[in-house]
Image: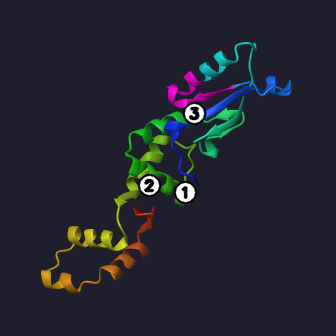
Amino acid sequence: MERYDLSEARIYVGTYAKYNEGSLRGKWIDLSECYDQDEFMEVCHELHQDEEEPELMFQDWENIPEELIDEGHLDSNFFELRDELENLDGMNVSAFWIWVENTGKDLTESVYYLMRQFNSAFVGRYVNKEEFAREIVSMEHELSEFAERYFDYDKYADELFDEGYWFESGYVFRDE
């Protein structure tokens, strides 16, 4: 899955009537200028006010996951998900897309539960698995200075990631 910047999302909005008449007339609408689905639909209808009841056609889009859009529909979760992701820092947004890609989460499900699941699964950013293992050992185990010199952090990391965690692109997640 591609990593999306929902704050940069935009849609080229035309209508089926214009398309059927051989016209691709429409306009790019920047979704950052729309608070929610209702405002987006209002902007679309104002754009095509020359038609009595325009049947909107989304002819192209950018920075929107395929499961949230097709040529005739933008899922209402888009706006809530965009707002939630804007509350995360850039590192965590990247982690979110990695998590979605690896877990196959459905972006059309409740955004509240989706974000709860992500926050529960996401542990943090680490240089490698061994760095994470060292942090776990320092937090959960009291090793003497002598034992620390001989402790095999690499093997311990292997055990952690075989049973309960996964690692990708510098991010650590709990198995669900």
Foreground: 155 or 10?
10
Checking the image for residue 95, the label placed there is 2
Of the image marks 2 and 3, the number of the one nearer the N terminus: 3
Spot occupied by residue 89 in the image (x, y as percentages of width and height):
37, 45
Query: Which quarter of the figure is the C terminus placed in?
Result: bottom left
- Residue drawn where x is 52% and y is 37% of the image: 8
- Residue drawn where x is 72% and y is 26% of the image: 14
Residues marked 2 and 3 touching at CB (< 8 Å): no
Distance in Å between CA atoms under marks 2 and 1: 10 Å
* Numbered range of the magenta stretch: 27-40
Instruction: Name the amino acid, label 2.
Output: Ala
Q: What residue sits right under mark 1 in the picture?
A: 101
* Residue 95 lies in quadrant: bottom left
Distance in Å between CA atoms under marks 1 and 3: 21 Å
Q: Is residue 89 left or right of residue 53?
A: left
Q: Is residue 36 left or right of residue 46?
A: left
- Residue drawn where x is 35% and y is 76% of the image: 157
Q: Is residue 28 magenta?
A: yes
Checking the image for residue 16, the label placed there is none
Q: Is residue 38 magenta?
A: yes
Distance in Å between CA atoms under marks 2 and 3: 23 Å
Q: Is residue 78 above or below residue 163?
A: above
Q: Callout 2: 10 Å neighbours few (<14), some, many (20+)?
A: many
Residues marked 2 and 1 touching at CB (< 8 Å): no
Spot occupied by residue 54 in the image (x, y as percentages of width and height):
74, 20
Q: Callout 3: 10 Å neighbours few (<14), some, many (20+)?
A: some
Spot occupied by residue 13 in the image (x, y as percentages of width and height):
68, 28
Checking the image for residue 76, the label placed there is 3
- Residue drawn where x is 86% and y is 24% of the image: 21
